[in-house]
Image (cartoon, grey):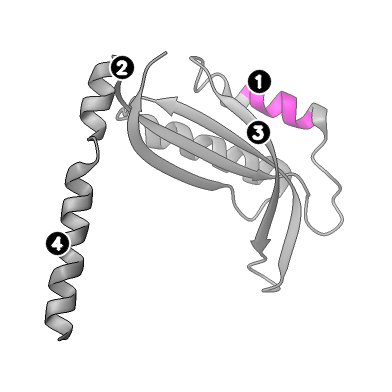
Amino acid sequence: MMRTAALLALTLLATGCASQPSAPSVCTKLGATPSLQVTLMFGLCRPNGGGPVTATDWANFVAKTVTPRFPDGLTVFEASGQWRDRVTNTVGSEPSRLIQIVTPDSPDLPARIAAIRTAYDRQFDQQSVGVQISRGCAAF
């Protein structure tokens, strides 16, 4: 019985996937090229009462640290973040910023992303800067 149910589920999954348009054909029809979507997640509160990362601090960081590494463009979103403190194990929340970058994959991409994350950690005394990367395609 379990085996039959598993086979039925796999069959439904396979036929469902087969009926969906494939990403490469959609990308080709739009004239899009393969790309990565990189999302960086930044908290705007310094720990231990260090105060907020101000609008001026943020603007300077983006201008001096992020933009030179991704001059072709990026998008900044205001957000509200939630995270677990690694030291106290408590859940906290804070104002945040997300930077979304759509870029081709390249050998130097990991180093550019790491440099941004490290600079923010050091400059604003953060435990981490989150990163999420997805493959896709893009046209501009």
- Marks 1 and 4: in contact by CB < 8 Å? no
- Marks 2 and 1: in contact by CB < 8 Å? no
CA neighbours of label 3 inside 10 A, class few (<14), some (14 to 19), many (20+):
few
Between discs 2 and 4, the one toward the N terminus: 4
Quadrant location of residue 34?
top left
> Label 4 is placed on what type of residue?
Thr
List the residue tagged with mark 3.
77
Nearest to the eye among marks 4 and 1: give it. Answer: 4
- Marks 4 and 2: in contact by CB < 8 Å? no
CA neighbours of label 1 inside 10 A, class few (<14), some (14 to 19), many (20+):
few
The CA span between labels 4 and 3 is: 40 Å
Nearest to the eye among marks 2 and 3: give it. Answer: 2
The region drawn magenta spans: 57-64
Secondary structure at numbered mark 4: helix
CA neighbours of label 2 inside 10 A, class few (<14), some (14 to 19), many (20+):
few
The CA span between labels 1 and 3 is: 15 Å
Between discs 2 and 3, the one toward the N terminus: 2
Instruction: Say if the magenta span includes residue 53.
Output: no
Task: State the residue in front, 42 or 140.
Answer: 140
The CA span between labels 2 and 3 is: 26 Å
Residue at 12% over, 81% down: 3
Residue at 68% over, 57% down: 82
Nearest to the eye among marks 2 and 4: give it. Answer: 4
Residue 134 to residue 13: above or below: above
Secondary structure at numbered mark 3: strand
Secondary structure mostly seen in magenta is helix
List the residue tagged with mark 1.
63
Relative image position of residue 99 (x, y in whole percent):
58, 33
**Quarter the C terminus occupies:** top left
List the residue tagged with mark 2.
30
Residue 18 to residue 31: above or below: below
